[in-house]
Each structure stands twice: as C-alpha cells, then as structure tokens.
Amino acid sequence: MAWKGKEMKKEKEVLTQREKTRKMTILAMFIAIIVVMGMVPFLGFIPLFGLSFQIITIPVIIGAVILGRKAGVILGLTFGVVSLIRGAMSGGFDFLFVLPWISILPRVIFGFIIYDVFKFYKKIINKRIIALALGFLTVSVIHTLLVVPMIATGFPIVFESPNIYNGILSGEYGESTIDGIANLQAFRDIMKWILGVLVTNGIGEAILAMLIGSVVTDRLIAYLTNNNQAILRGGVYEDSN
C-alpha cells in the first residue's frame, strides 16, 4: 500500500513537472513572438491613415492573461529590452528608448498590472469576450499613459548628452526631430504633445488591441480549457469561467 502511494506521488510529480515544462515552452514562444515583432520592420507596427500603431503589447497581454502575473512581468521586461535595442539601432526619435526608464521600466510595470486589471473585469462581467475586450482596451491605454510621460522626461537630456543628440540626429529626419524636441521644452507644450499622442496613437492602439487581442485570447482559452486545462493554472482564467 505504501509502495502504491509512493508511485502515485511520483506520477503526480512527473505530471506537475510536465505541466511546468509546457508552460515554460509557451512562455518562450511568447518571448520569441515579441522579439520578432519588435525587430522586424512593419511587423510590430501597423501603418494606418498616416500613423503607426504599435501592436507588440498584444502578445504581452495575452501571455499575462494565460500564464499569470510572473509571465506578464517577464514578457514586459522582454518588450522593454527589445524596445531599447530597437531604439539604439534605429536612431531618430526612437533613439530616446535607449534610456531604460523610458523603454524598460514602464513595460515591467505594465506587465505586472495586466493580471489585476483582467481579474477585476472577470469578477464583474460574466461574458468572457466582453471582459477580455474591456481588459485589452484598459491596459493598452495604461501602457500609453506609462510610456508617453517617460518619453517627455528625455527631451531635456537630448541637449545635455552628445551621445543622445547624435543618436537622434543619425536617424531618418534626424534634424527635424531635433527641432521638434527643441520646441517641446515648456511644460504647457509638453502636455499638449502628450495629449496629442494619447488621442491619436494611444486610442488607436487600444482599439486595435481590443479587436485583435480579445478574440485571439478568447479562442485560446477555449482551446486550452478543452485540451490542456493545466496551462491556465496561475492565469486569469485558470477556472475557465
């Protein structure tokens, strides 16, 4: 009898380890998607009506909803590091993202809070697709609110750091970018710029994330519920409701 109990315990440990391996594999897949979307031109950004809408936040959000808070932080950190590398390679306005409090810090905070926002909507809304849609809309706006003010803090540094100045100047339309930043030194002008980005890119990105992310996440949760419920453990929808 004792032998049988040991065998059952051993089998349970093997299954638990298998589940962990599967979750780590899925996390690695999300990391790879973020890296590819961040580094391949036009893949993580959708040109539309003369604007460029960022959609790299979508795999970060999906991963955090499916796998949980820890995965959200890891994916947010990955997003931030990719953003920093991309900024260093791109030049122009994007070069400001070489500053870690602009590229990395907001994305880590963003990855941390995703779980709480979706958990909140899950509690108050019974219809999963609606809860997911509102969650994507909310956290996408939060991401913009976290990143854009941080970008503004880098404006004065441009004219104090030769490396930052030359990095921006080396990019496409570098001179016009420098001139634009030079005109954004007064607090009122900076607030107008922040509001303009929120109204244009921020809202557009949030709507795209809501339309794409909610549908993909809903179908993914349904699939995992029917085929591998264990993957959802620790995530927002671990009880599949």
Image (cartoon, helix red, strand yellow):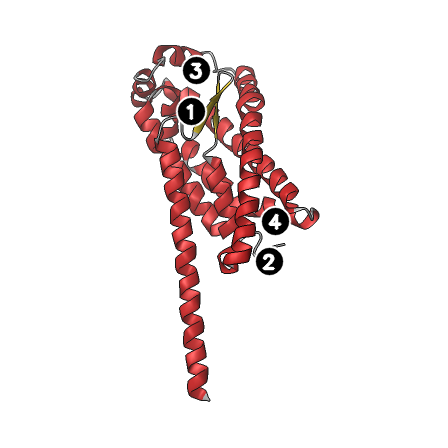
How many residues crowd mark 2 within 10 Å: few (<14), some (14–19), many (20+)? few
- Badge 1 amino acid: Gly
Residue 63 in picture, x, y percent from top left: 48, 46
Question: Mark 1 or 3 closer to N-term?
Answer: 1
Label 2, secondary structure: give it. loop
Please tell me whether mark 1 or mark 4 is closer to you in this view: 4
How many residues crowd mark 4 within 10 Å: few (<14), some (14–19), many (20+)? some
Please tell me whether mark 2 or mark 1 is closer to you in this view: 2
Q: In the image shown, does 157 or 115 lie closer to the viewer?
A: 115
The residue labelled by disc 4 is: 119
Question: Mark 4 or 2 closer to N-term?
Answer: 4
Label 3, secondary structure: give it. helix
169 left or right of 128 in image: left
Relative to 9, does residue 56 appear above or below in the rendering? above
- Badge 4 amino acid: Lys
The residue labelled by disc 1 is: 154
Q: CA distance from mark 1 to mark 4?
A: 34 Å
Q: Are marks 2 and 3 in contact (CB under 8 Å)?
A: no
Residue 62 in picture, x, y percent from top left: 50, 44
Residue 13 in picture, x, y percent from top left: 42, 71
The residue labelled by disc 3 is: 181
Q: In the image shown, does 112 or 202 lie closer to the viewer?
A: 202
Q: CA distance from mark 2 to mark 3?
A: 49 Å
Label 4, secondary structure: give it. helix
Residue drawn at 32 percent across, 15 percent down: 169
Q: Quadrant of the C terminus?
A: bottom right
Q: Are marks 1 and 4 in contact (CB under 8 Å)?
A: no
The residue labelled by disc 2 is: 239
Residue 2 in picture, x, y percent from top left: 44, 88
- Badge 3 amino acid: Ile
